[in-house]
Amino acid sequence: MRFGIDVGGTKTEILALGDRGEELLRHRIPTPRNNYEDVVRALRDLVYAAELKLSNRGSVGVAIPGTVSRKTGLVKNANSTCLVGHPLDKDLEAALQRPVRIENDANCFALSEATDGAAAGYDTVFAIIAGTGIGGGICINGRVLAGANGIAGEWGHNPLPAPRGKQEVEDPPLCHCGRHGCIESWCSGPALVSLYEARTDRRLNAPEIFDAAGNGDGPAAAEVDAFYDRFSRSIAAVVSILDPHVIVLGGGLSNVASLYSELPPRVERYAFTPEGPANIVKNKHGDSSGVRGAAWLWREEELAAALPQIEFARRRQK
C-alpha cells in the first residue's frame, strides 16, 4: 500500500492507493500555519490515523510546493514559507520511523498523469500547472526528472520568450520572485486578470475573461489572444528543448476548453521544425494528481526494498 500526501498552502491531503492504483482512503485537513513542527506532527498523525483505519501500513510520499536542496538537504523555493530551511524528509522519517520520499508538487502531478493519467503510455511527458502560478514537471519513461538541483521543469520563472511590442519589451510586469517579465507574470491566471484590468479598468476573474472573449467583448478577446500567443511561445521553447511526446495541462486554467484547440497550432508555429501540432491534453485526475503522484513516488521494486524497514518500524512501535 502507498500513501501520498499533498502539502498545500491552505490544505493538506492524504491518499492511500492499493496495489492496482485503486483509491482506498482520502482525507483533508487545514495545513498548519507558520509553524514547522506543527506541520511535521500533522503529517505524522495523518499517516498513523490512515493506517489505523485501514489496518495496514504503507510507504509514504509527499508533494510539497518547493523542493529539497540537493546541496543542503533543506527545503527551498516553497511558497509555504514555514517549510523553508528545514530538513522535512529527515524529520518526517524520524517521526514515522520509515523512509519517506519528498518531491515538488508539479513533479508529482507529472508522475501521476504519466503513471495512470492522461499521459499514461508516453515516454516523455511535460506537465504544466497553470493557475495562480506557472509550474512544470518532467517524466521520462515513467520516472520524474528532477535535475541536478531539483528544479527541472520550473519554466515559470524563465523570461517570456521572444518579447514583442512596447509592453513586453519595455514594461514587463514584476513577478513575485523579484524579477520582471517571467512567464508566470504574463501567463498565470492573476496575470491575465491584471492585464485585462489595466486595459479596461474592469476586474473579472480569468474564466470570466475567457467567457467575455467568447461572447464578443473586444478588449477581452484582444487580451485572451495575447495570452494564447505568449503561452504558446513559452511552451514552444520547452518543445524545442525537450520535444515531449505529450504536454498535460493542470491547474485552474486547464479547465479552459479553448486552450486545447488554440495552443497546439500556435506552438507548432513557434517551435523549431516540429512535424505537426503539439500534443496538448487535459489532465485526468484534476486536483488529485499531486497527491496521487506523491503516492507513486515509490515504484514497485523500490517499495519491495522499503517494506522490511516499514515492518521493522511497526514492530518497534508494539
Image (cartoon, rainbow, N blue to C red):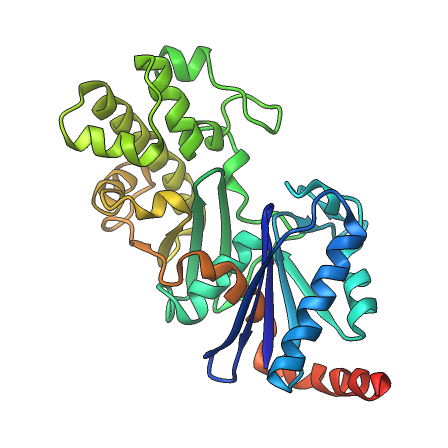
Q: Name the one closer to the observer, 209 or 280.
A: 209
Residue visible at 70% across and 62% down?
Answer: 43
> Quick check: 42 left or right of 239?
right
The number of numbered badges drawn on the structure is: 0
Instruction: Please determine whether, in this image, residue 293 is positioned above or below residue 200.
Output: below
Residue 236, image x and y in percent? 36, 40
Question: Residue extending furthest left?
Answer: 216
Residue visible at 45% across and 79% down?
Answer: 22
Residue visible at 57% across and 70% down?
Answer: 295
> Quick check: 224 left or right of 188?
left
Q: Quadrant of the C terminus?
A: bottom right
> Quick check: 113 left or right of 70?
left
Q: Name the one closer to the observer, 34 or 307.
A: 34
> Quick check: 53 left or right of 87?
left
Instruction: Please determine whether, in this image, residue 150 is positioned above or below residue 45.
Output: above
Instruction: Please determine whether, in this image, residue 107 is positioned above or below residue 207.
Output: below
The image quarter in which residue 2 lies: bottom right
Residue 164, image x and y in percent? 36, 18
Q: Is residue 163 visible?
A: no
Residue visible at 22% across and 40% down?
Answer: 262
Q: Is residue 272 visible?
A: yes
Q: Quadrant of the N terminus?
A: bottom right
Residue 37, image x and y in percent? 81, 53
Residue 114, image x and y in percent? 43, 66
